[in-house]
Amino acid sequence: METAEKCCQANAQFAEISENLKARSTKESKDQTTKNSLETLLYKPVDRVTRSTLVLHDLLKHTPVSHPDHPLLQDALRISQNFLSSINEEITPRRQSMTVKKGEHRQLLKDSFMVELVEGARKLRHVFLFTDLFLCAKLKKQIGGKSQQYDCKWYIPLTDLSFQMVDESEAVPNIPLVPDEELDAMKIKISQIKNDIQREKRANKGSKVIERLKKKLSEQESLLLLMSPNMAFRVHNRNGKSYTFLISSDYERAEWRENIREQQKKCDFSLTSVELQMLTNSCVKLQTVHNIPLTINKEDDESPGLYGFLNVIVHSATGFKQSSNLYCTLEVDSFGYFVNKAKTRVYRDTTEPNWNEEFEIELEGSQTLRILCYEKCYNKTKLTKEDGESTDRIMGKGQIQLDPQVLQDKDWQRTVISMNGVEVKLSVKFTSREFSLKRMPSRKQTGVFGVKIAIVTKRERSKVPYIVRQCVEEIERRGMEEVGIYRVSGVATDIQALKAAFDVNNKDVSVMMSEMDVNAIAGTLKLYFRELPEPLFTDELYPNFAEGIALSDPVAKESCMLNLLLSLPEPNLVTFLFLLDHLKRVAERESVNKMSLHNLATVFGPTLLRPSEKDSKIPANPTQPITMTDSWSLEVMSQVQVLLYFLQLETIPTPDSKRQSILFSTEV
């Protein structure tokens, strides 16, 4: 191919002939001959191997390991892949390749499902990045057994595409956000339908029932995927038209920008309307992402993901070219989209940051951990304003798959993530849900962690434990505008240091707190409630709260929930009301800290309500940490709903009115 290219450049006649070669073809045209470039014909044998490799890959996926063909298919796939990788070492892979009229190659570089914002409405699109254009298509509905087809909505030549820097004076399209309550209601439905499917499978009921449930599951998961993203990714055409996509992660946004910018350096463009039609039709064959990322589209033997807690230590990073202010964020997937879970402190003016920070991240069916490394920009004038948001610069990004087999052994696993010359060292350890959610009573009764709240308040001669008052005070002093306060994980070593200080009644604890990251203080407060030997809402009353929140009559629900609340022991009630007031004040700053009442209920609901082990629905068999997923989800959702109910009530009787609760209930 290189020789042919040199000949074309050296000899115009050769170039003309090589662009208009006629080859016999019964498939591509009704005529006996069709025009191809020499380059296309030379590539055809490799293209044949590429296509057969994809077929082998699919065959292997659906061939049982016990089948005699399985090892043969493995060998065939290995030989094919080795051959392809050997010829692709020096040149750009041409796997998704198609020929256009003029003989140049147009290749598919990347494709993905995305949500487009069209006149305020969310639309699911399949987006394709070719070597010379960016194409947005809609999957047509299949009618009468016809194969998949795409409808081109719009395209932008890469030569005309830009990521418009949004001036502050310009109007940025308003992103219609879906309330967290609605998203959670979808998650509850998804969990319930998954439970129903499992129950039907166990009962060996007819496949019609299961198919009907699977259809409902697909609808709910598609809706959640459509409604959950809210991070803007805008592309601009030189002719003045802009398009807005919504995605859930900065990782994807950065990846798309990098791929497009890299390709823009080396592309030219031409496209007729006929070629556009051919290109759109070819998307079905070329696509690499075949299914919307729903659990319904997974094979039965695919992992449903991990449920529990992942401890991650971000050790250090090397490979930065110049001294910068550096920090990392961690993301995991949940319900088909990615959520930011933790952020390291900013390590200033360095090329080799040593964070050595540990985070505890809750996993909900997660399969991937992502890490993004940013340069913190303190100079407001130098901040890049893309998509209408001021953003710190991404220096690198990478991800690891969370393999249940590897992580199940409880030990720390060290790993290195490479990203564009930068290497980040991590350690990860997984604790499955039934171990991570146990309430562990303290062996010593002198501290505050793991000790009954009544004992602590009596010892301190206070109505609210000192640890709760101190943490709340410090967060209200400097954490009310911290983005993701209570949601973003604090550094585990700082949390453990604070825990130890509170346990020994260290007089310098307030000095320690003033110097710590506010997320660590928030983490300490959550840990205190999580480690209570009995939940704040008590084991005895927990089932009643769960039943009360399920009542449909609003008057009966209010009477039931308030009477239950006033039935709590006094230290529990006073502490809860103190915390409730604080959480409402946090939510008042939602426009800055992004923590709504619902977000706070999601964080604190299980922490305050989850029953002790003896009353919990924890599965007895610890060898199945991954399968007991959806009944867990439903229980957690119920706990969230209880706390959210109290957060949304405008007035709650104070502890002084506890004596009047009988009078109150008769008024209701």
Image (cartoon, rainbow, N blue to C red):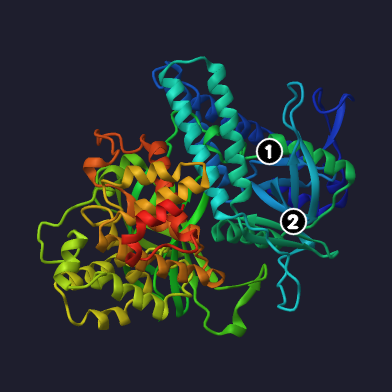
Instruction: Check the picture and name the quadrant holding the N terminus.
Output: top right
Q: Which residue is mark 1?
A: 286
Q: Quick check: can you spot residue 523?
A: no
Residue 53 appears left or right of 201:
right
Q: Which residue is mark 2?
A: 120
Q: Quadrant of residue 342?
A: bottom left
Residue 36 occupies quadrant: top right
Residue at point 73% right, 61% down? 235
Query: Nearest the camera: 270 or 359?
Result: 359
Residue for point 66% across, 35% down: 47
Residue at image position (47%, 37%) is 191
| Residue 33 horizontal/vertical position (percent) | 87, 28
Of helix, strand and loop, which one carries label 1?
A: helix
User: Residue 7: horizontal and vertical position, in percent?
Assistant: 77, 50
Residue type at the position of mark 1: Leu
In-image side of 275 versus 307 (left or right): right
Q: Is residue 362 left or right of residue 619?
A: right
Tell me if residue 262 comes above or below residue 143 in the rendering: below
Q: Position of residue 653 (x, y in %)?
A: 40, 63
Closer to us: mark 1 or mark 2? 2
Residue at (42%, 64%) from the top-left corner? 488
Q: Secondary structure at mark 2?
A: loop
Q: CA distance from mark 1 to mark 2?
A: 31 Å
Is residue 245 depicted above or below 376 in this figure?
A: above
Residue 164: percent from the left, percent from the top? 73, 69
